[in-house]
Image (tube, rainbow, N blue to C red):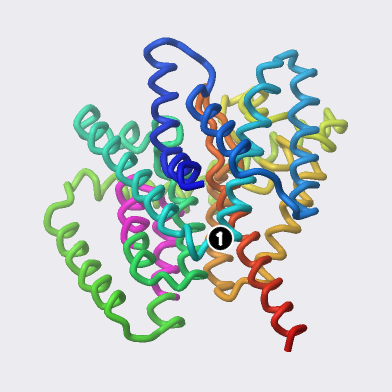
């Protein structure tokens, strides 16, 4: 089992290796992630939760249906196994989180290190071109990773792991600034205020975090390039000034998605498939840039309702409801996908963490009910 946990920790590295396979040898399939998924499914095993079984059935139906419509049967080979492996890993770790939380911390530290390393490389290559700098290599970028960070911060809050919580809160703040994520900076600011004033209380880890935050603020004020600050200001101006609408350029994407449902109502039941919006979008966008609408568009109404039920159950059971709402707000309006595909890169960290948190809270509730019955 320990080897399976190491495989899970290595997922960010394996995704990068798949990316290089495509860049160097033009191999369009996720070979390393596929092998890792095969290992996880075989070694870790099955799932007992009925709601998770229904979720898997609906997503598998969507995958198979779209494979026949598109006549691309490689979808059947790779997508189901990778999807199932992420769900299995989420359920298993959620049920054993006290023992294995450190593996998740290492996974996210590896992911963070790779993310910032690629950022530095791009900063050297695209010096002064901030629009290209904030781009990403497959799963390595600003907005999606920021979404994973918010959900992971919620998980660390649930587990009362204050030391790692403040480490990753610092990483979250840096990520939103470096990658010029407007939504990330806004949610981080609200998250920080909530943490400091609503969940108030003194602790050694919090004090260290505040000292680090002040030092980072002074460092940014002293050394941040003027062009960087001006570009950041321009992005916020665009954010609130685009057609006098707060949604910026998201509005036309939402309208286009609904227009596709109007002209193809049958797809409302099983969706247009993963990456489906990219195939039909007139502007060539990779997704509809809304978490909930993306699930509806790609996988249909049934999968949408099941994910909504799972998130609702998390909201009911989780103690830190405000942090849950902040992370959900971010992933929704930034359009972080539950499970996404980019060439040969398959990314399902959001699916993994949502299933993990759901399984964790379900297990705690089950143990509490068992204790009450025994009493």
Q: Can you see residue 277? A: no
Q: Tell me residue 230's x, y (percent).
A: 26, 48
State the quadrant of the C terminus.
bottom right
Query: Between residues 333 and 118, which one lies in front from this camera angle?
Result: 118
Which residue is farthest top? 25
Which residue is farthest left? 222
Q: Tell me residue 208's x, y (percent).
A: 24, 73
Q: Secondary structure at mark 1?
A: loop
Q: Tell me residue 365's x, y (percent).
A: 68, 73
Taking 187 as reference, is 79 above or below it? above
Is most of the magenta stretch helix, strand or loop?
helix
Q: Tell me residue 356's x, y (percent).
A: 59, 55
Res 217 → quadrant? bottom left
Which residue is farthest right? 266
Residue drawn at x 59%, y 31% is 38
* Residue 173 part of the magenta segment: yes
Residue drawn at x 66%, y 65% is 314
Query: In the image, 104: left or right of 170?
Result: right
Q: Can you see residue 11? A: yes
The residue singled out by tag 1 in the image is 96
Residue drawn at x 47%, y 46% is 5
Res 127 → quadrant? top left
Q: Which residues are magenta?
A: 170-194
Residue drawn at x 56%, y 34% is 39
């Amino acid at each position: 089992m320990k080897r399976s946990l190491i495989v899970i920790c290595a997922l960010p590295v394996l995704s990068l290796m798949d990316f290089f396979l495509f860049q160097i040898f033009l191999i369009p399939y996720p070979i390393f992630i596929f092998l890792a998924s095969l290992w996880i499914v075989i070694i870790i095993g099955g799932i007992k939760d009925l709601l998770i079984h229904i979720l898997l059935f609906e997503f598998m139906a969507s995958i198979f249906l779209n494979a026949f419509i598109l006549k691309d049967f490689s979808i059947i080979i790779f997508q189901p196994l990778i999807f199932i492996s992420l769900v299995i890993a989420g359920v298993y770790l959620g049920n054993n989180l006290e023992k294995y939380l450190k593996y998740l911390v290492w996974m996210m530290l590896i992911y963070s290190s790779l993310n910032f390393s690629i950022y530095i490389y791009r900063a050297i290559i695209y010096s002064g071109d901030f629009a290209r700098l904030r781009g990403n290599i497959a799963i390595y970028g600003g907005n999606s990773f920021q979404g994973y960070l918010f959900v992971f911060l919620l998980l660390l809050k649930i587990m009362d792991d204050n030391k790692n919580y403040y480490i990753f809160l610092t990483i979250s703040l840096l990520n939103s600034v470096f990658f010029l994520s407007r939504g990330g900076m806004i949610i981080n600011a609200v998250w920080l205020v909530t943490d400091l004033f609503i969940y108030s209380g003194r602790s050694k880890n919090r004090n260290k975090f505040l000292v680090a935050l002040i030092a980072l603020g002074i460092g940014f004020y002293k050394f941040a390039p003027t062009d960087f600050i001006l570009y950041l200001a321009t992005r916020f101006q665009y954010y609130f000034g685009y057609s006098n609408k707060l949604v910026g350029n998201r509005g036309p994407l939402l309208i286009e998605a609904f227009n596709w449902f109007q002209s193809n109502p049958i797809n409302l039941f099983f969706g247009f498939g993963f990456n489906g919006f990219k195939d039909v979008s007139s502007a060539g966008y990779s997704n509809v840039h809304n978490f909930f609408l993306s699930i509806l568009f790609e996988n249909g109404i049934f999968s949408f309702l099941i994910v909504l039920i799972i998130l609702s159950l998390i909201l009911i059971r989780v103690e830190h409801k405000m942090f849950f709402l902040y992370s959900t707000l971010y992933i929704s309006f930034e359009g972080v996908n539950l499970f996404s595909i980019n060439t040969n890169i398959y990314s399902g960290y959001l699916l993994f963490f949502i299933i993990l948190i759901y399984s964790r809270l379900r297990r705690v509730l089950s143990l509490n009910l068992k204790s009450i019955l025994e009493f």
